[in-house]
Image (tube, grey):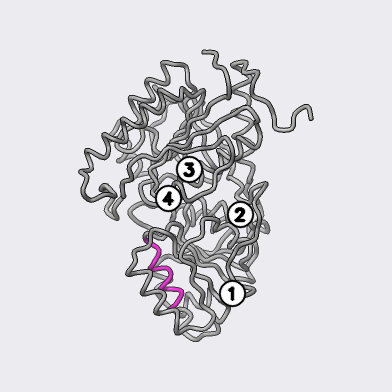
């Protein structure tokens, strides 16, 4: 199909409870409009904070009703007055109408190939019939092999992906981890996989200034969106109270999804401790990472990209349930010498954690590891998009600055 005007990319981020998926889609969208002058990107997101992040020109978002993923893996509506089934039906209708109206050249689906509870399936079939290139974008670690096999077997996911998707992009380097480990994947689908490398989070136009009055040489403690981050924060405060020489300034970045009572408890507890500073939320957390001498974190995908991008020594305390994603990523990164890791039960021992925190600024940076991991994912993705439009002879897609 020949279209006039901008080339169109539609992105989907189910975003049940957290910021990772939305932030990954935003990074990709910004890279595309920075590279190409003739492209427009719309992100469909279920994040309640979709409007809290700045978007570049020619990038926009459509908000669908939010749902929350509970600790046991079930879902519920963010609005407790609306039944989950009704919420999912509203999401399906909005997504389908948006996709039909926008009529994208490419659709990139983040992490959930058929969408939340299969909400994308009819839309994907409709777009495939129109000739849209369909891309499943997967984290380099999805979950433990047994857990992912059980989850995807229930929904016949591999067969559906082979039927629908023209491309699978893995947002990591080949050799770190295979996100399809343990699955019976046909060769035809394997041949559609491209490993992009990790996504650079420094940003070509990102200022490293922030508006906080912070001490020098601080450790940044972050738990992403913060929905399950309070235990890590309390572990760090217990380590400060242990009195074994860990006295470096600490900044706790709580995250927007931390419960109010947990947030208040951390404020009260930290008030009695020297050089402990709390920031409730910052929509440009990367600026805080850039100024830190070390990072203490759980280990979501974006956190790893930021640690690599800003080349900061890191101590990781990964989430180990309900998904094993963070633990697998942390074990592999520790094996490669990129980060130090403590399991949550080890971090529960204040003196053990205090010693690890005391030593953190002196550990090697990620770039000092024997085989530094590539951070060219955004460039690779832009190349893939450019190659697609070249194949379909889109003459209106031009490089930014071309011919100037």
In this view of the protein, which residue sits in the foreground, 397 or 114?
397
| Spatial separation of the CA atoms under disc 2 and disc 4 | 25 Å
- Determine contact: label 2, label 1, CB under 8 Å: no
Which comes sooner in the sequence, label 3 or label 2? 3
In 3D space, how far apart are the residues under numbered discs 3 and 2 (Cα atoms)?
A: 16 Å
Task: Give the residue at mark 1.
Answer: 359
Specify the farthest residue to the top.
1
Question: In the shown orientation, is residue 108 left or right of residue 384?
Answer: left
Residue 62 sits inside the magenta stretch: no
| Left or right, 277 with reference to 266 | right
Question: To which residue does mark 3 refer?
Answer: 139
Q: Distance between the residues labelled 1 and 3?
A: 31 Å
Residue 267: image x %, image y %? Answer: 41, 75
Specify the label residue 344 is tagged with: none
Q: Report the residue marked by disc 2.
A: 308
Disc with the residue nearer the chain's start (1 vs 3)? 3
Q: What element carries label 4?
A: loop
Q: Disc 4 designates what residue?
A: 49
Is 169 drawn above or below residue 233 in the view shown?
Answer: above
Tell me: residue 385, above or below residue 287.
above
Task: Residue 286 in the image: state x and y as whole percent.
Answer: 58, 57
Q: Do the residues labelled 1 and 3 touch (CB within 8 Å)?
A: no
Work out how far the residue at label 4 is from the one at label 1, CA to CA, in angstroms: 36 Å
């Amino acid at each position: 199909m020949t279209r006039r005007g901008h080339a169109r990319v539609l992105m989907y981020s189910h975003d049940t409870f957290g910021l990772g998926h939305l932030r990954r889609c935003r990074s990709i969208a910004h890279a595309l409009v920075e590279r190409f002058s003739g492209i427009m990107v719309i992100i469909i997101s279920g994040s309640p904070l979709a409007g809290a992040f700045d978007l570049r020109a020619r990038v926009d978002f459509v908000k669908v009703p939010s749902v929350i993923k509970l600790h046991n893996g079930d879902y519920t509506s963010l609005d407790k007055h609306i039944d989950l089934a009704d919420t999912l039906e509203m999401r399906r209708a909005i997504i389908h109408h948006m996709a039909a109206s926008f009529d994208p050249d490419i659709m990139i689906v983040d992490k959930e190939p058929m969408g939340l509870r299969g909400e994308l399936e009819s839309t994907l079939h409709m777009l495939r019939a129109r000739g849209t290139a369909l891309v499943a974008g997967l984290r380099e670690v999805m979950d433990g092999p047994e857990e992912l096999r059980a989850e995807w077997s229930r929904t016949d996911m591999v067969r559906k992906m082979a039927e629908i998707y023209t491309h699978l992009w893995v947002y990591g380097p080949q050799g770190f981890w295979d996100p399809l480990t343990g699955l019976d994947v046909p060769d035809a689908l394997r041949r559609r996989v491209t490993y992009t490398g990790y996504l650079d989070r420094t940003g070509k136009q990102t200022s490293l200034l922030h508006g906080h009055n912070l001490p020098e040489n601080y450790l940044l403690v972050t738990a992403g969106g913060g929905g399950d981050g309070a235990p890590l924060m309390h572990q760090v405060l217990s380590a400060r109270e242990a009195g074994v020489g860990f006295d470096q300034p600490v900044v706790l970045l709580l995250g927007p999804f931390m419960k109010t009572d947990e947030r208040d408890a951390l404020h009260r507890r930290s008030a009695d401790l020297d050089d402990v500073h709390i920031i409730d939320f910052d929509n440009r957390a990367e600026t805080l990472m850039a100024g830190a001498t070390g990072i203490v974190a759980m280990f979501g995908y974006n956190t790893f990209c930021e640690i690599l991008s800003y080349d900061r020594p890191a101590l990781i305390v990964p989430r180990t349930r309900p998904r094993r994603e963070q633990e697998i990523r942390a074990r592999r990164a520790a094996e490669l010498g990129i980060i130090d890791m403590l399991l949550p039960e080890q971090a529960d021992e204040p003196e053990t954690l205090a010693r690890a925190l005391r030593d953190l600024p002196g550990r090697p940076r990620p770039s000092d590891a024997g085989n530094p991991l590539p951070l060219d994912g955004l460039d690779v993705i832009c190349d893939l998009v450019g190659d697609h439009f070249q194949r379909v002879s889109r003459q209106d897609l031009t490089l930014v600055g071309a011919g100037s």
